Image (cartoon, rainbow, N blue to C red):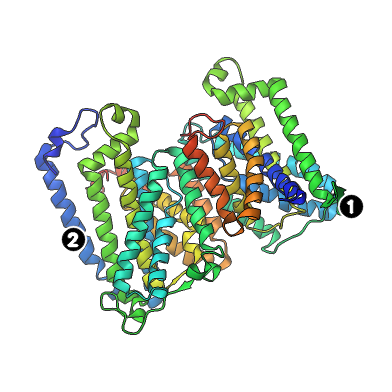
Amino acid sequence: MTDTTTRRPPAVSEPAAGGENAGRKRWIRGGAVAAAVLLAGFAVPHLGLDSYYMGLVLSGVILALLSLSIGFLARRLGLISLGHTAFFGGSAYALGIAITHWGWSPMPAALFAFSAGTLLALLMGVLVVRASGMGFLMLTLALGQALYQFSTQAVARPYTGAYDGLQLQLGPDDTFLGMTSPQLMDAGLFWPVAWVALVVSAVALWAAGRSRFGTVLEGIRENEERMRFSGYNTFAPRLAAFVLSGAVASLGGVLFALNAAYVSPEVLSFVKAGDSLIATIVGGMGTLLGPVVGALLYTYAQARFNVSGNLPLYTGGALVLVLLFLPGGVLGGLEALRRRLPFLPAGKKDRT
Amino acid sequence: MDFAQLLNAVAFGSLLMILSSGLAMIYGLRGVTNFAHGALYMAGAYLAYSVTQHLSFWWALLIVPLALAVLGAVLELVFFRRLQGRSPIEVGLVTFGLAMVLERVIVLIWGERTLSVNAPAGLDGTTSLFGTHYPTYRLLVIGIALVMAVALVWWLRASRTGLHIRAASHDVETSSVMGIDVDRVSLVVVCLGAALAGLAGTLAAPYVSVDPGMGVGILINVLIVVVIGGVGSIGGAMVAGMALGLVQTMGSVLLPSYSVLVPYAALVAVLLWRPAGLAGKRLS
């Protein structure tokens, strides 16, 4: 990728100084950080968390895939999606339907579900990526909501179970990566799968953002018209980014369904889309890891505060306060704090 | 589709019309997509319930819009004015958060159960129209909505404030250079938009179920109406509101198993045909 910098047209500003060598160093450093994080994560089930907290961290990590995908679109293209639950929930349902109704074994079903979610992102992307700002938000909201409504209708009922949901029925010999159904539902055993998926997705999105493709996206975000006049096709990169982020959300949906062994219309709902968007914003949309932090915070808050049913009160309130007083989210706020306190170690964070 | 169904469609369309014109006005002037509009409507319905417990429905029709106007003033003075200059998306998301908070506060005050409000005495029967018996109360809803629509359009066209509102929704900066007090006009518009949501909530209370899900349910319809009508166009919102009411009712008669998809299909069809909506500026 390093030679692309020299061919970059003048319309796009070059984000990093230092030329090719610094570029290569950054990739190496990024890879090293990712590998270290990946290895460190494997220790989580051995930290002595009880099964309740282990389950909580695991669902946080699965939700983080959805938040990560929403955050990627927001950061790279300035597009806020309220319809990504279509891919998350859509792939979860696809998995359930393939396993329960068609009797597929889990591995092919998972591949099918992931592809189905991604294909759905392609179809929806064709309809929505031309719009921007509020138009994009509304279109994604409407299409996501349409899928939700459809899943609860009488025509879809034989497949989705409507409001009763869909129970995944795995035979005793059906395994996914060597795990049977009870093992998949065990948070400690399922953890490595979800963790690898999260780290790989984060690295893939980071790499996409850092590549020439990412620079084109940035150009489109800053001034779409200028990019078009500079001779770029702006539709294709937008669509590609949308599909990429849809694929990450689909991966989240597949893992969710495997682990929960149950899919209900809730995973498609506008409320879930809103919640994961809020998690993304509260965590910090401007950074790669912000959405992950937000998803973990959200999962914790959900477990901690939802006893009284007042979670929407707190999430809504947190959203308002963060937007009013801390526009960069929690991670953005920490970053600002670090800048104000010069004696803290300088962050090595790239802008991604 | 028989006559009673047509009247049902018009009654539902009337409610959408009132709600959508309020939302479109706030968008036109403040540039804010007010996701809290559904929650305001819900607040209107619950307040109407409480007022009718103590006074009559007619009092609710007066008091609730006034109370909601006060809430609108809070929205404008505390949030929208502070957030001027921020991106429309961020402000939209703030209203999203406010909607969640408001809905929850309503549930904390009135509880989770479904409430019912009686139609005012004398209007709870049926009227015979062209050989069909029809609930009198729904005719009242249609009547009030039509009167409101005509009054609103007339006020926007004929009064000085209306002129200022129309000017400011075209171009805020130029209007303020021309001597229009945009802050004052915005306050009027946001209060009025909230009051209209309260009016719609009050009118809806006797014939839909007043429950915690009503705000989100209607909000999506209203957003669809506003986008179909052309974001920011009040006239477009009114026409699209009535049209969506009709299309949706027609859908539930002709294609019962797919009827919930009708609004979304309508939205996608209109946007593919006219990306800016029926009467809108460029959607962005």
Nearer to the camera, A315 or B161? B161
**In the structure shown, which secondary structural element does the residue marked by tag 2 occupy?**
helix
Q: Do the residues indicated by labels 1 and 2 lie within the same chain of the protein?
A: no
Q: Is residue A334 visible?
A: no
- Residue nearest the viewer, comparing B276 with A33: B276
Give the total number of marks visible in the rendering.
2
Mark toward the viewer: 1 or 2:
1
Question: Along the horizontal axis of the image, is A26 left or right of A132?
Answer: left
Question: Mark 1 and mark 2: span between their CA atoms?
Answer: 73 Å
The label shown at residue A35 is 2
Residue under mark 2: which chain is it in? A
Image: B151 above or below B59: above
Give neighbour class at mark 1: few <14, some 14-19, many 20+ (Cα, 10 Å). Answer: few
Q: Nearer the viewer, residue B198 or A234?
A: A234
At 14% from the left and 33% from the top, the residue drawn is A7
Name above or below for residue A148 compared with residue B272.
below
Q: Residue at x 35, y 77 (%)?
A: A186
User: Dot 2, crowdedness within 10 Å: few (<14), some or many (≥20)?
Assistant: some
Percent of width and height locating residue B156: 69, 25
Q: Which residue is mark 1?
A: B121
Residue A126 percent coordinates (x, y): 38, 45
